[in-house]
Image (cartoon, coloured by chain):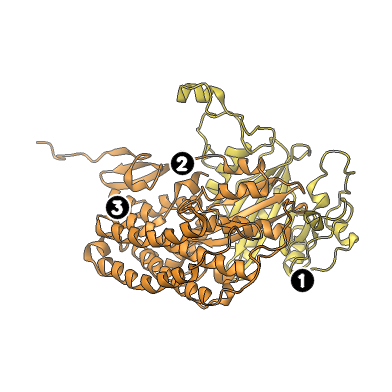
Chain colours: A orange, B yellow
Amino acid sequence: MPDTFLDSTELVLNMGPQHPSTHGVLRVILKLDGEKVLGTDCVIGYLHRGVEKIAENRTYAQFNPYVDRMDYVAAVSNGLGYCLAVEKLLNVEAPPRAKAVRVILTELNRIASHLLWLGTHALDIGAITPVFYCFREREEALKIFEQYCGARLTTHAFRIGGLQYETYDGFERDVKEFCKMFPAKVDEYEELLTNNRIWAGRLKGVGILTGDECKEYGVTGPLLRAAGVKWDLRKAQPYSGYEQYDFEIPTRENGDTYDRYIVRMQEMRQSVRIMEQAVEAIPEGPILGKVGKVIKPPVGEAYVSIEAPKGELGYYVVSDGSTQPYRVRVRPPSYINLQALDKMVRGALVADVVAVIGTLDIVLGEVDR
Amino acid sequence: MADEQNPGGSEAPSPPTGEGQKPPANAAGDAAKPASPKPEANAPPKPPATMAAVAWDSELARELKERFGDGILATSTYLGQNFVATRPDSAIPVLEYLKLEADFDYLVDITAVDWPKRAERFDLVYIVYSFPHNERLRIKIQIADGFEPRTAISVHLTANWLEREVFDMFGIRFAGHPDLRRILLPEDWQGYPLRKDYGILQQDARWVQENLGIESGQ
């Protein structure tokens, strides 16, 4: 038998686009040495629909439903960002009632998005139970969306200038019930996972990204906060009345996959806090600001961004004074966060790639647009 | 109602009042944007000529002008958002200066806007943010088709995929980019979809036939 029983040779492994743990049609070409990752190349674009091109060929209002199809698990956030950007160009503001309802629905959507992330992330790691629990509560959130606007995922909940619909009878009751029920459920998930040795063993020290590296790669959202940077656009540049609500920005120090898990769990609790405050005092009044039937912003441009569940979601809208946007650029958090994948998995094991893709919380509809 | 937003012609549109902005003195608007507006009768006038931006004066704006001289074409503000127009070759030094000296440590986005009737047909827009100052800034350059701006990767690593996307969608090549491939479209796709002369129904028919085995993807 030769001295080296098995030679270690470099190997290229193709992961995806049809792979259950890539959360959509993401293809990652892995360069491996045994099980060690030497490098990655992401192949994306399978879901590219040319959303930005479509925007240039639709009126401002017509394009509104399209944005829901980018991050389709957080459609409400997408809609909010787009509406705020066009409102900025029009220089109008949504009335207080619309703002409060926007906050409630957006936070509810943040919870729904984080629940989908938690369930699938845990499933990837090998914990089967949480996904059922998460989908159980996510269903309650989606029911509120369905009652409000008839759609569960691609909600088109907001209109430029305010809300699409007045809230339904019992909306406040449903939201309050959700807020009352939900924190105990988060305890339940945490009981399953937080001190679970396998869970911690698979996540701790995996996919570390420091605060400076996050800034260097433009990585935002829970990834940035888990690396110790206390930055949340809801606090830094408040929009839609977030400055009225009392809430914390959860942060952690290590910037690994486990810390990102903790940050997102705490964010769900904070979202409940915001919703509780908002639903207690929804102002009376109109739900639509002073926008014309034809939306025609003056010539100009604006960049408006919000704290979406995945990070900074920005819209750069250029108006040429017509009824159609001249250019709409979406700054998608998933796309930019995904770029850091290579940095996070270099030197790690193949199994960690699955954990890191999970912790990035990407939605390919938003990556590819 | 919509007309309330843009009452006049192109001469002196009343700008939506941004945060703490003064009323639109014509002089201020003209100072920010030297090109005079064209008559409305022709094709839509140049955007900078009619965007009711006013000159932006601040310590940072003065610092930039002092440091880069005529590399800085204008510092303006619109709707409370500040932007700096620079010469094409000044963009990267300005980004670098902003990062190292002025704490603009986060490159938010790079994108382009196509104005096909203009000689320098593309606006290339860099959006930066400063964590310490909680401030956002846009750097804009105008470049002609075929001009190769320098890559920003040496300043911000984020620029890698952002520039690849701009290349993919607009066909702007970045000089010095280590891996300038298409990113969202297939690598052998022909054409740049976000250019204005690329129709909404247009596609690379050859690619669709060869790879999908159908006549048309529509």
Q: Which mark is residue A124?
A: 3
Quadrant (top left/top right/bottom left/bottom right) for the N terminus of chain A: top left
Which residue has dot 1 on it? B20
- Circles 2 and 3: CB atoms closer than 8 Å: no
**In the rendered image, is residue A269 in sight?**
no
Closer to the camera in the image, A368 or A5: A368
**Alpha-carbon neighbours of circle 1 within 10 Å: few (<14), some, or many (≥20)?**
few
Looking at the image, residue B199 sits to the left or right of residue A13; the answer is: right
Residue at the image position 66 percent from the left and 67 percent from the top: A286
Instruction: Give the alpha-carbon distance from disc 1 to disc 2, as whole Å.
Output: 43 Å
Residue at the image position 67 percent from the left and 52 percent from the top: A317
Q: In the rendering, at what x and y percent does residue A294 appear?
A: 73, 50
Discs 3 and 1 share one subunit: no
Which residue has dot 2 on it? A44
Kind of residue at badge 2 = Ile
Residue at the image position 69 percent from the left and 38 percent from the top: B147
Discs 1 and 2 share one subunit: no
Q: Nearer the viewer, mark 2 or mark 3?
A: 3
Kind of residue at badge 1 = Gly
Instruction: Give the alpha-carbon distance from disc 3 to disc 1, as whole Å.
Output: 51 Å
Q: The residue tagged with tag 3: helix, strand or loop?
A: helix
